[in-house]
Amino acid sequence: MLDVRTGGYSGMEIDLAGRIAEEIGVDTVSFTPVTAATHGQLLDSGDIDMVIATFTITDERRLSWNFTTPYYTDAVSLLVKKGSGIESYADLDGKRIGVSTGSTSREALIAAAAENGVKLGAGSFREYATYPEIKAALDARRVDAFCVDGSILAGYLDSTTEILSSVRFSPQNYGIATKLSNTGLAGYLDSLIQTWLEDGTIDSLIQANGVVESYNQ
Amino acid sequence: MIGQIFTPWRWAELLSSWQDFAFAFLTTLQVAFFALLLALCIGAIAGVLSASRSRILRAIVRVYVEFFQNTPLAIQVFFVYYALPYAGIVLYEVPIGILCVGLYTGAYISEVVRTGINSIPKGQFDAAESQGFSYVQTMALIILPQTVKAILPPLANQCVNLIKNTSILAMIAGGDLMYFSNAWATNGHFSYGPSYLICGLLYFILCFPLTHWARSYEEKLKASVQGGKA
C-alpha cells in the first residue's frame, strides 16, 4: 500500500520484497504499482522482474509465467453496503457484482455460487480497471457487491460497508511470479520462500503487518 | 504480445467467442450511431446560433462549447456514472455513452458549423438582405447549402473521433467493444494479443473508410476550386 505522505510503500509483500533484496544483496527495490490486468503483461515486456502482489497461482497462468511456492493463502469474499439484504449466495441472483478486470474472483464466485445452487452468468458482473473504482461504483450503487480477495477487501472496509463472513470461498494461493523464460530467478525465489515458510519468517511478516492468517481448510 | 499473436490456439479460443465480440461491436455501433445523431442535431443548432446576431444566444453556445471542449470526456462520463446517482439520476451505461459522447462531439461540430458559416463572404448576407430575404431564409437557402460542401471533411473527422471516443465506456463497464476486448483478454487464458489486435482492427474498419473518404473529397474540392479559377 502506498503511503501518500511519505511516498513509500508498506505491507507484508513489501517487507517480503525487502527480504529478497537483502538476500540478493541489493540496497534499493524499485516498486511498480500493478493491477490484475497489468501484472502479467509488465512481466512479459520486461518492465518488472517479479510480481509480489496478490498474484494468484492457477494452472492457466502457469502456461504464461513461473510461480514460486505460495507464501500466503487468501479466500475471496464480498464487500456489501450495510442493510443491502445480501447475506448468502441466493441473495446474489439478479444482483450486479463488481470485479477487477483480469482477476480470478469472477470465475471463483460463479463456481462457488453454482455449488450452492445459484446460477450467475456473465451479465451479473461489471469489470473495472482498479479497486477504488469498484468501491466508488459500490458507493454510487452501480454495483451491489464488491468481490475480491479478503486481504484486499479489508483495505476498503468503512462504516457504511461490511465484509460477508457467510460468503467466503475459493482459497487462493499467492506466489511470486516471474517471466516464463527466466527460470533461474524462479528457482532461486522458490528456494527462498520454501526456507522462509519452514523457519517461520513468512509467519512473522504476516503477523507484523496485521494481516489475517493464511486461510486453512 | 507479439509471441501471442503467432500462437494458433489463442486465435482458436478467440474464434470460439466471436459471438460475444460481435455483440460488443454492435453495442459500440449502437452508441456511435445515436451519439452521432445527437451530436449532429446539437452541433447544427449550436453552430447556427453561434453565428447569429443575438449576443445572448452566442454567449449560451460559447459556454456550452467551452465547457465540453475544455474538460476531459472521462471526467464528464465519471460525473454522470458515479456522481449523478447521489442526486437520484441513474442512467445505464449505453445511454450514458450516447449522451456524453454526443454532447462532447456536439461542441466540436458546433465549431465546425460556425467556421463554415463564417467562411461565406459577408457580402452575401448583405446581398440577401437587400433582396428582401429574412435572416432564417438567408441561412437556409443561401448560406448553409454552400457551407455543407466545405464542412463535410471536418465533419467526417469528428465522426471518426466520436467512434473512437465511445471506447470511454470501457472505464465504466459499458459492455462496448473496448470493454469486452479488455475483459476477454484478461480472463480465461489471458490471450490479450489476439484480443487487442482484433479490437483495434474493428475500430480501424469503422474509421478508415471515413478518413479516406474525407481526404479524397477534400482533394477533389480543392481541385474543383482551382479548376474554376483557371
Image (cartoon, coloured by chain):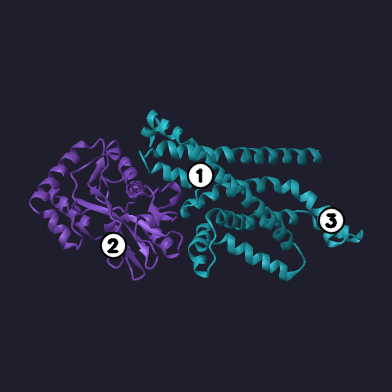
Chain colours: A purple, B cyan
Q: Residue at x 50, y 44 (%)?
A: B177
Q: Position of residue B130 (x, y in %)?
A: 91, 61
| Kind of residue at badge 2 | Ala
Disc 3: which residue: B124
A158 left or right, relative to B65: left
Disc 2/disc 3 C-alpha distance (Å): 70 Å
Q: Residue at x 72, y 59 (%)?
A: B45
Disc 2: which residue: A154
Discs 2/3, front: 2
Subunit of label 2: A
Checking the image for residue B177, the label placed there is 1
| Kind of residue at badge 1 | Leu
Q: Position of residue A103 (x, y in %)?
A: 34, 48
Q: Position of residue A131 (x, y in %)?
A: 36, 57
A159 left or right, relative to B125: left
User: Do tags 3 and 1 sit on the same chain?
Assistant: yes
Residue B190 higher or lower than A3, as above or below: above
Disc 2/disc 1 C-alpha distance (Å): 33 Å
- Residue B129, by quadrant, is bottom right
